[in-house]
Image (cartoon, rainbow, N blue to C red):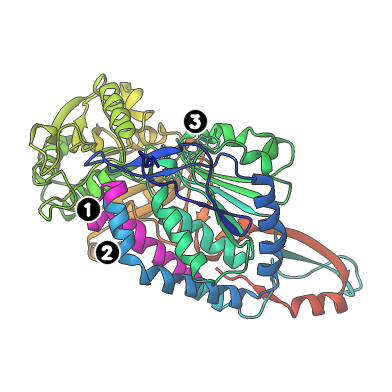
Amino acid sequence: MTQPTHAPLLPNFMAGRWQTGSGEGTPLYDPVLGSELARVSSAGIDLAAGFAFARDQGGAALRALSYGQRAALLNAIVAVLQTHRDAYYEIATANSGTVAKDSAVDIDGAIFTLGYYAKQGQALGEARLLLDGPRIRMAKDPAFQTQHIQVPTQGVALFINAFNFPSWGLWEKAAPALLAGVPVIIKPATATAWLTQRMVKDVVDAGILPAGALSVICGSSAGLMDQLKPFDVVSFTGSAETGKIIRSHRAVTEMSVRCNIEADSLNSALLAPHATPESEAFKLLVSEVVREMTVKSGQKCTAIRRIFVPRAVYQAAAEAIAAKLSKISVGNPRNETVRMGALVSQEQKASVLAGLAQLKSEASVLFDGNNQALVDAEATSACVAPVLLGTENPLNAKILHAVEVFGPVSTLMPYDSIEEAYAMIRLGEGSLVCSVYSEDPAFTAQASIELASSHGRVHAISPDVAALHSGHGNVMPMSLHGGPGRAGGGEELGGLRALHFYHRRSAVQGSSLALDLLAAQAATLTF
Ligand code: NAP
């Protein structure tokens, strides 16, 4: 008998059973060693049956529970994931090429988010629907009133995710969906699908969730969007290009399937106008820029891509950032001296190098870590060291404000007036996050108001929160994640606000007697 010449196919979990796709599948690689780790295939899987099973069985079983009972399920998921945490770190090292600290952002970030929603959900207790605002009289006689309510949508939540957060990307969406009572079908990005598949496998094996509540389909996305029906929702994270395809699918344009898009983003950091190189604000900006360029090798949708500083400190900022970047060792994440691992794949390396070449047509190189040798890794691996670019004429730049290089690359830009800085930040056409560094609370408050309309989050940092703040790029479950314009126009997280996406709002107009009984089964969301 001939032995298979490739790694085994990861089975998909659809319609309540494990099913292996047909054909040879698509290989997943170790981005540092180049070895093949596993394969994925969705070919031949009956998608219609899988979606129907999730919708009918998973949805009904979840909706039969209260918010408090579903919150308990989230806690049980946390316990399972914690049990297998070491295995997840091994998969992340092998398949994402990340050092342990970076794997933690994905793995422990997911566990934290699930735990957060479990706690929030517990507070909703035995309720089965949500009251949306107070009752409003509709006639002189108070007997006839309107009450807006929110109830779980009776469909599935399809998640199509990006490669950079195979763990957190699943659970930051699944936590509010499951809490809301909506079954989840996750399609991870192929390059790093292994960790997502393994986590779903562990949760399924533990037998915590009702049948049909959680499904995973790895490999090609072909046909997934075609399965969606009017009460389903789709949440996509990935490139603006694929986002466009999702948004223009007939499920969205003709059936009004609710669609959330988290796409790419040219996030900024802004140093206050009067900051000097000796100031705390300057030092805080420099540290955060270096952290953002290097955590997960810059493969974070929230990473700082553009750095705006007063012209007087441009040179000093370039030197301070370069000095810190020169200490970052890059290479094999298994070597304990390595601070930054690889990009996730050869495709991403090619994409980052091509993007860098584009940016260089408008900027010069202020620091290039690629002049130093990699640690324990070949030059042919998917490792790319940090590169700091700069231009003294950012107002004339186009590419620098438009091209997101999804790697350890950022561009320093001077400004001559704060109005000019705001205008350049807005050239990003809507971003996920902007961080502001200042010692003047009045400036911070004003800058936050200026920047809020073009950003999902403003991370406003001053010396008094230096040791407390959660980081420019860290997405915390209590704060909104998403951004207007090219960032996709989506909204995720933000505490219990996340439940809205998985609920339908309806105005019930009726007698106060009926509304009293309805309210007895409801919880009121307070933010
Ligand atoms: P991508 O190429 O757009 O892929 C994203 C997902 O879409 C993958 O699961 C992919 O599957 C799937 N897909 C590809 N073509 C599709 C189609 N025609 N129909 C349905 N699904 C399809 O993005 P990526 O390269 O994985 O991710 C990097 C990008 O994501 C960056 O631009 C980054 O800024 C953005 N991102 C944004 C956020 C955020 O929260 N805003 C977070 C993380 C990343 P395959 O992998 O099988 O092709």
Residue 272 seen anywhere in this rendered image of the structure: no
Residue name at image x 65 percent, y 54 percent = 156
Tell me the magenta residue range: 94-117
Of mark 1 and mark 3, the one earlier in the sequence is: 1
The residue drawn where x is 43% and y is 54% is 196
Q: Residue at x 15, y 32 (%)?
A: 379
Q: Position of residue 426 (x, y in %)?
A: 41, 35
The reply to whether the magenta stretch includes residue 116 is yes
Q: Please report whichever mark, 2 or 3, sits nearer to the chain's N-terminal start.
A: 3
Q: For this view, does 117 lie left or right of residue 328?
A: right
Frontmost of labels 2 and 1 is 1
Q: Secondary structure at mark 2?
A: helix
Count residues near mark 1 (Cα–Cα under 10 Å), then give few for <14, some for 14-19, many for 20+: many
Tell me the residue that label 2 is attached to. Answer: 465
SS at badge 1? loop
Badge 3 is on which residue? Answer: 241
Q: Residue 99 — which label? A: 1
* Ligand 1 under 8 Å from disc 3 Cβ: yes
| Residue ranking furthest to the top | 361
Asked if residue 121 is among those painted magenta in the image, a careful observer would answer: no
SS for callout 3: helix
- How far apart in space, not on screen, are marks 1 and 3 (Cα)? 29 Å
